[in-house]
């Protein structure tokens, strides 16, 4: 019952969105940086968590 709906959502919404993002060069996972040089692609985040952040995570 849900297979036609998921098919429509995937091919009518997600596929055009992905093609537009690729055409604009949007690379949120930094896939183009992997293997270029010896530096790490990962970003260091020096952040101290507070108790409020632990009680209600985003």
Image (tube, rainbow, N blue to C red):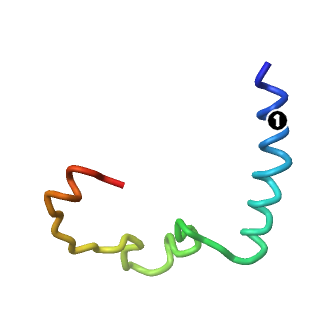
Give me the residue at 14% from left, 57% from top. Answer: 51
Q: Quadrant of residue 40?
A: bottom left
**Quarter of the rendering occupied by the N terminus:** top right
**Residue at the (20%, 53%) spot, across then down:** 54
- Image quarter of the C terminus: bottom left
Q: Nearer the viewer, residue 39 or 6?
A: 6
Q: Is residue 36 left or right of residue 48?
A: right
* Element under disc 1: helix
Query: Image quarter for residue 7?
Result: top right
**Mark 1, other Cα within 10 Å: few <14 / some 14–19 / many ≥20:** few
Q: Is residue 38 left or right of residue 1?
A: left
Q: Is residue 2 above or below residue 22?
A: above
- State whether residue 44 is above or below residue 55: below
Q: Work out which residue is located at the far top of the displayed protein and give it.
A: 1
The residue where tag 1 is placed is 7
Q: Nearer the viewer, residue 32 or 50?
A: 50
Q: Residue at x 60, y 71 (%)?
A: 27
Find residue 34 and report its horizontal and vertical position in percent.
Answer: 50, 70
At which x and y percent is residue 13? 80, 51
Pick whichever, 44 or 49, lies toward us.
49
Number of numbered discs on residues: 1
| Residue in view at x 50 percent, y 78 percent | 36
Q: Position of residue 39 (x, y in %)?
A: 37, 79
Q: Position of residue 14 (x, y in %)?
A: 75, 52
């Amino acid at each position: 019952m849900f297979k036609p709906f998921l098919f429509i959502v995937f091919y009518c919404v997600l596929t055009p969105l992905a093609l537009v993002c690729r055409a604009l060069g949007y690379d949120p996972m930094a896939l183009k940086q992997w293997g270029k040089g010896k530096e790490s692609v990962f970003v260091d985040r020096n952040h101290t968590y507070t108790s409020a952040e632990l009680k209600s995570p985003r």
